[in-house]
Each structure stands twice: as C-alpha cells, then as structure tokens.
Amino acid sequence: MNTFSLYKHRAIFTTVIFSFVLLFTLTTKAQKLTSGVQWIRPDSERSSPVWGIHNGIVIGLWPATIEKSGPGADGGPRGLLRIGYEYMGTVYLINYIAIEPVVNGDMEFSEVSPSRVDGKWGKLLWASDSVNTGSFTSYAGTRGLITHPDKLHPETEQLTLFIFMETFIDGAHPYLKLTIRSDKPGELGIQIFNHEKSAVMERCALTATMGNYSRLRLLYLKDKVIDSRRLFIGYNDIEFAEKDAYPYSQMLKNKNKEPIAIAESNESFDELASWPQQPTYLSRWGWRYRPFYKLTQYWRVDSVGYDPSLQVRVNGRAKYWSGASLDKSKYIDIPGGTAFENFELRENYHSGQQFYFGLSLKSAKELIEGF
C-alpha cells in the first residue's frame, strides 16, 4: 500500500470513528435531557386517558378519574377536560374546563349538551397525536408526543396531544391542541381550531367551571381586586349570579406584556380545608377541598395575536351545584359565602387562537411580583 492510500484509509477510518462518537454523544445527551423530565403519560394507547407532568398540571378525559377513588368512579361529568395537579406523587382534581361555542348568538355547553351517540348529557371527547380525528374511545388513544420546542434551551420538552369531540347541536365542531412545557409545568396551553364543515363560531369559550371547589373569591385585575362576596352581595339563590365581564384593558400584564387574569381563595389553607360537621355537609363530602396545599389559578394569552374583544368573565354561586334539580333542599351553602364558579377569558373566535390555563403554589401576590 502506497503512502497516499494509507493516508486515505486512515482519513476514512478517522471520519467513521468521529461520526460514531458524535452520534453517540448526541444520543446520550438527548437521553439525559429526556430522563430529566418526569411526564405522566399512558403506558399505551389502551391505557387510561390521563396526561401531565410531575409537580405540575394533569389532564384527564371521561371516563378516567385523575384522583384516587373507589371502584366504578368515572371522574365526573362528560364533556369536560379534568384538570388536576400532581405534587409529591399524588394527583388531586382541581377544576374542569368546558368548551362553549357560540353560533348565531347562542351558546352551547359541552358538559350539558346531549351526546349525538346516546342522548346523555356531555359531549364525548377523545385524544389523538395528530389532526387525524379518529373516533371516540374510552382509552387514551395516544401517549402524547414529546418534542424539544426551544432551540436555545434543548433541555426543554413539550408534551402535545389533540382533543376531538362530537359536533355540537348548533353545528359547531371545534377541536383542541393541548401542550405542556417542562419549563412551565403548572401551565396548560390550549389552542382552538375548527373542522372544515363546522358552523361559523362567533366565539369558542374555554371556561374553568368549578372555581367554588377551591372557593375562589378574589379576582386580580390591573388596578383592583374583585371580591365575589361584594360583587354578588345579597345573592343567595341556587342559580348562577352574573355580572358584566371586564375588558382586556383592565387586565394585568406581565413583563412580556401578556394579559393575565388571576383568581385565588380569600381563605387560609386551614379554613379552606375545613368542612362543616353537619349531616347535610357530611353527605356531600365530595365538595370538601382535598389537596394539602392551596393553588392560585390563572389565565393568560400571548402578547401578540389576541383580539381587542378579549375580556375576563366570572360568575358566582352561593350554593354548590346539585345538577339541574329545582329542589333547593338538595343544595348546601358554600362555606364562607359566594365564590366564583366560572372563570374564563372570552375572545372573538379565530382559528388557532391560544389560551393558557395555569395552577401555581404561589399566592396571587407572589405571581404578580414574579410576572
């Protein structure tokens, strides 16, 4: 072998070795990056439909329960995203998010709108890892896709899945793209789209529907704090109490100029965790606040792309929900007084609009200072 051939073979050999080392290094680095995030994902497509992240937000779909419960539990009403929080290995249900499209001025509610399949309350929801809709299944359908969305921070991971649902009675047919980022574990990104044959939606609200479980009574705006007990003073009926929404000009903004609405309980943890020791309350212990910590809840939108129609809307309840019953004896007063029930941002619909719902162990004051 002449000298030229020898150098040529050495060069090829060196290139192969270098490529192998580079590939091994990149693979090992990627494995280390992935191993640092503790995702909560179904073991397979046939597992229970629950997704989330350690020390952060958790999402579930009917018939899954995201909180430990007895045999036969179905996690609550259909037509809702179950929203929980995982902390130190335990998941607690915190809220539900409903989908409420508006067509020709009429709003339809995903949790009470009858299913086209069986006529029962609540639209059927199911998940996929792509925009291919598939069909309803009581199983997960997807584990969710893990990606690295930030080139500047390749260690950051994102879990993504799509949520599909039946067509509403009014012809609205939205679907959702859900995302959770490892650098914002308490926050769920929700992007709204519509199928091609959907009726034109004037709005498609996403509303956190169970604020009175956490006894949310303080809504933080730019220049004031709205107290539900003062806002709905004197109200003590079984229906929802309604007031005007607040325009985006009254919303808080963080350092990135993103509009934010924050709600929290006015009670200390000990007060929130207490429960009246009376038969009518003990028989409805499901409303007792079960987590061993308080959470602040918030909505935000990106600093660009939102519409001037953006507003914050809350309503109130003086008594816990008891289905559609008109029998007032089946209702119990919310301890401490009227609390916010629905907590949401509203905006004129456009395909791809993005909202974020968050849960935080920080108080509203700490969040505001940190934002």
Image (cartoon, rainbow, N blue to C red):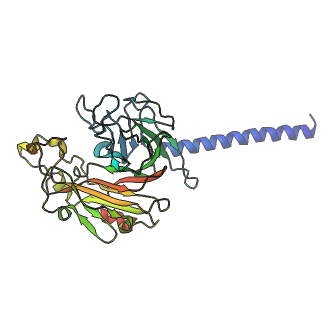
Q: Residue furthest front?
A: 104
In the figure, is residue 92 to the left or right of 50?
A: left
Q: Which x, y percent locates residue 20?
A: 69, 39
Q: Which x, y percent locates residue 224?
A: 29, 70
Image quarter hosting the C terminus: bottom left
Between 23 and 344, the one lying in front of the other is 344
Whether 94 is drawn above or below 264: the answer is: above
Q: Quadrant of residue 165?
A: top left
Which residue is located at x 37 percent, y 41 percent?
Answer: 170
Between 12 and 357, the one lying in front of the other is 357
Between 356 and 121, the one lying in front of the other is 121
Which residue is located at x 30 percent, y 42 percent?
Answer: 90
Q: Quadrant of residue 264?
A: bottom left
In the figure, is residue 324 to the left or right of 225?
A: left
Q: Which x, y percent locates residue 180?
A: 44, 47
In the figure, is residue 173 to the left or right of 148?
A: left
Q: Residue furthest right?
A: 2
Q: Which x, y percent locates residue 288?
A: 18, 46
Q: Residue furthest bottom?
A: 223
Q: Is residue 281 visible?
A: yes
Q: Quadrant of residue 135?
A: top left
Image quarter hosting the N terminus: top right
Which residue is located at x 67 percent, y 43 percent?
Answer: 22
Numbered circles on residues, count: 0
Q: Is residue 87 visible?
A: no
